[in-house]
Image (cartoon, rainbow, N blue to C red):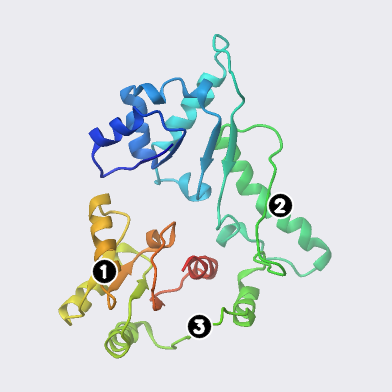
Amino acid sequence: RIATIVGGMSLAKQERVLRQNPHVIVATPGRFWSLVRQGEDHLSDLAASLRFLVIDEADRMFDRGHFPELKPFVDMLCRDKGDTTRIRKKKRQTFLFSATLMSGKHVSCSSKKRKRKKKQQHQSLQSPLLGLMEKIGLRGKPAICKVERKNENIDEPEHELDSAVKSVQLPQRLKLTEIMCTDRDKTYYLYYFLTQYKGRCLVFVNTIAVLRRVSAILQHLQIQGLSTLHANMQQRQRLKHLDRFRSNENGVLVATDVAARGLDIPEVKFVIHYGVSNLMKYVVVCRHH
C-alpha cells in the first residue's frame, strides 16, 4: 500500500489514509512533519520502525530557506537513534537522489591537466555529499551510484558543456532551436512564436517575478489557454492549473523549475526556455520533458 501526503490537500482525508497503515509514504516535508507532530499512530516511533528513508532532490531539499521542516524531522531520527532504551528491530537505510548535485558550484572548473581530472571530479562530488551526510546524520562511507547514458559525461566544466550539448544526438522527434535576441526583445519573440505555432507549449522562466511579468503581458495580449505554475501556489491551485493545461491541446503553461521536477505532462509540443542562466539546469530540464 502506498500513500501520498502533501500540503494543500484535505488533512482529514490524509489522516484516514494513514490509518490504513501504508507500507510506503511519498510526502512533502511540511505536511509530513505536521502529521508527525500531531502524533499520528502510524508515524509514531519512526526511529525503530522506519526501514528506508529516501530523499529526492537532496541538495535542493537542504538548501537554506527550502523545506525547513525537514531538518527537525532528521534531527528527531538522529536523536532517537541514540536512545539506548529503544531496541531497533531493523537498521535504517538512507538514499539521497539528485540530478543536479554536480551543477554550478559543484562542478570543478580547472581541468587543464587530464591526469588530475578524475581526482577533481571525485572531490567535487564528495564535497556536497559530505555536507548532505552531515545534515542528515549519516556516518561511514556512502555508496555513490552515478547513473548516466553510455558515453555521456556531465562532469565537464560549463564552458565545455556548450559544445557537448550541441554535439549530443537528439531523439528523432525532438528538434533543438536557438533564437538569438536581446533581453528587451525576448517577450516579443515569445508572443510571435505562440501566435504562429499551435500546440501545447511549456514556457520556463527563472523566477516568480519574471513569471508574473511574462504571464501578465501574454494575458493582456489575449493568449488563449494561459496557465501558470510556481512554488508559491497552493497545491490545489497547482493541480487545477495543470489539469487546465492538460485538457487544452493549445494550452500555454508559464512555469518556474517547479514544473521540471517529477511531472509527467503528455503531448507537449514545444518547450521554451525564456531565460537560460544555468546550463546544467537547462540540460536536466530538457531531459525531463
State the mark number for residue 176: 3
Quarter of the picture holding the N terminus: top left
The answer to whether residue 10 is above or below residue 41 is: below
Give the secondary structure at mark 2.
helix
Most extreme residue toward the top is: 85
| Mark 3 Cα-neighbour bin, 10 Å: few <14, some 14–19, many ≥20 | few
Location of residue 129 in the rendering, given as x and y in whole percent from the top left corner: 62, 45
**Residue sitting nearer the eye, 126 or 247:** 247
Give the secondary structure at mark 3.
loop
**Residue sitting nearer the eye, 46 or 22:** 22
| Mark 2 Cα-neighbour bin, 10 Å: few <14, some 14–19, many ≥20 | some
Three-letter code, disc 3: Leu
Location of residue 247 in the rendering, given as x and y in whole percent from the top left corner: 26, 69
Location of residue 273 in the rendering, given as x and y in whole percent from the top left corner: 41, 75
State the mark number for residue 247: 1
What whole-number distance in Å separates the C-alpha atoms at marks 2 and 3? 33 Å
Q: Do the residues labelled 2 and 3 touch (CB within 8 Å)?
A: no
Chain-order first, disc 1 or disc 2: 2
Residue that appears at 34% across and 83% down: 186
Q: In which quarter of the image is residue 280?
A: bottom right
Three-letter code, disc 2: Gln
Location of residue 39 in the rendering, given as x and y in whole percent from the top left corner: 34, 21
Three-letter code, disc 1: Ser
What whole-number distance in Å separates the C-alpha atoms at marks 1 and 3? 26 Å
Chain-order first, disc 1 or disc 3: 3
Residue topped by disc 2: 123
